[in-house]
Image (cartoon, coloured by chain):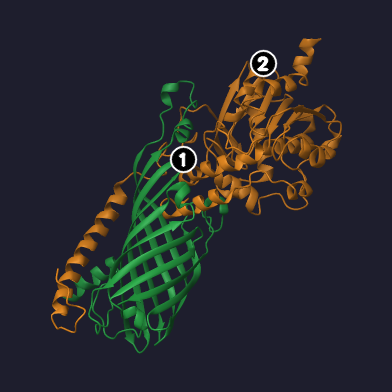
Amino acid sequence: MHDDCNSRSKHCVPLFAKFRTRFARLASIMLLTGLQSGCRLPDTEAPGALVPPTADQDARLPQLQVTVLGKTRALHLETFGVSSAPPLFVLPGGPGSDYRLLLPLRALSDRYFVVMWDPRGAGLSERVPARELTIDGFNAEISAVKAALAPGRSVTLIGHSFGGDVVARYTATHQDSVAQAVLVEPGPFTEEGRAHYHGGDLDYSTVEDFFWQNQILTSSDHAAADYKAATALADANRTFTCDGHIPEDPIWRFGVFAHHVLTHTGHAPGPQFDWAAGIRTFTKGILVVAGTCGAASEAFQREYNLPELRNARLTVVDGAGHMSLFTGYQDATIRAMKAFLTQYQKEAK
Amino acid sequence: MRAGRWMICSILVCPLQAMAQAPVLSSGAIAPGQIEIRVGIDPAVVVSLGYSHRVTAVDDPRAARLGAEIEVPTTVFSHGAWRASLVSSIGWTASGHWGVRGTARWYVAHNRNRAGAMTGVGVAFRGRPGWYGHRSGVALDLGWQSTLATYIQNSAAVDSTFTQRHRDAALSRGPRDGWYGSTANRFRIGLTGSHGVGHDIDLSLSIGSVFALQKQGVLVGFDLGQVPFYLETSASIGVR
């Protein structure tokens, strides 16, 4: 195409007019085609497209309908062992994580009726709006599961990381309902602990990648947000390891919106909030299990959390990190629990 | 009829249409060729390099340009992240020094990380209505970016998130590799200022908010990649 537009030739105008017309038509067609194509292509939020569907989207998942704060929601939940055995509930961390990492604890089903579930908004449980994601909601959720599966019975509670905080609070506020409590590297109970806790920090490359993805995939719905969070989560878990390498920890889905609401909004614990407030009057036995590596290990527990617990027993799994307590060191972790749990002590006697 | 057709085209293509007076721009803006270097935070730290060529006459008030651009974040080497665009721009004034410059970028963007690889095609429109003087200007900076279609190829790590969910393993089918529609939509609103330096260089600074609409209703949330801020500096160098 001859371009004489550098000159003041009057011929430039018709040439540009033709080019303009053709370009405008081509661009219009491309845009309209693109918009139409975008409308027909699958949505990232289609169940099972990028991330596993939640219990309300997949009826074949093991699940339990519970009513919490007036709303009935589908919890992704599994049970192991016979229902007549003493109940034992397992709570994952995050907030937002699922119980897949904690599946080795089903080994306790030889003496207990083991129940594991993903909290509302987390893992493969139903996604819920922000108003349903509150600290009090966790207590209500545990009570709802207990009412459904172990009515009128004391339960043993095992909580990992943030789940350990939740167990501490439920134990403190429902002492008659709890038989024993096991806290596996619980998160910080108090503001002092929170100020010194560096678990989950991300490196620059991960943060940059996370934001660059917005050019292509924005966190516009739960599925896209959880999909993008999975990459960042793996990097965050470096801070819980001995060697700083990204671990290949088993996970189904991380509920990043629940994590956001419970850690970065008004629903997060305030400066004066203490997860373990009132727990000193609980006398039926608390075990803290910790590894020796990572942000939530033995050193952190001794300095910030153990002082809040009275008569708690600490068992250390040498060489274990926050996640590897349930992967490479699961046998040692389970042995530590069995050395504490009443049903195994009865057996030993 | 012709004006109506043109109005439709201008809305879709943003904006290629004949208007009245030229914005009074610096010499660099009317040079035949133009190199543009941009450094910005949106909130990824990005650098872009582009070249455009004027397709209208020197005395044509529209100062339309066509060109190409490559934009990369700091993870260009570690994550293979880039965005390549075809760029068109045009400017006009309604009266006096008040006018608007519009830019359309048709792009292909790519990223690769632990979740897999994704390549998206989309368009970004940007309009800057404001005051354009002989050497400097100030304007609103308004934009809309949409990645219309994205091909996602999931990694083994993502595949593994679909396993072990059901007692019957056959029920646990994995993620879908393939095309997805309308995967990114972002809006931009801010202010921009420009100033001519020397004979062929224009410098500009833009600042404001860039955000995506979320069904979850989160406007500010690091976890959801929503830090609604951008800052951009650029240098446009005329090439004769």
Q: Which mark is residue B115?
A: 1
Q: Identify which residue, A266 or A209, lies in the foreground.
A: A209
Looking at the picture, how far across and down is residue A152, in whole percent?
72, 25
Q: Quadrant of residue B89?
A: bottom left
Q: Quadrant of residue A3?
A: bottom left
**Residue at the front extreme?**
B240
Looking at the picture, how far across and down is residue B187, in whole percent?
43, 63
CA neighbours of label 2 inside 10 A, class few (<14), some (14 to 19), many (20+) = few
In the rendered image of the structure, the colour used to display chain B is green
Q: Chain of mark 1?
A: B
Residue visible at 69% across and 24% down in the picture = A88
In the rendered image of the structure, the colour used to display chain A is orange
Q: Secondary structure at mark 2?
A: loop
Looking at the picture, how far across and down is residue B141, in whole percent?
43, 72
- With respect to residue B191, does B176 lie above or below? above
C-alpha separation, residue under disc 2 versus residue under disc 1: 42 Å
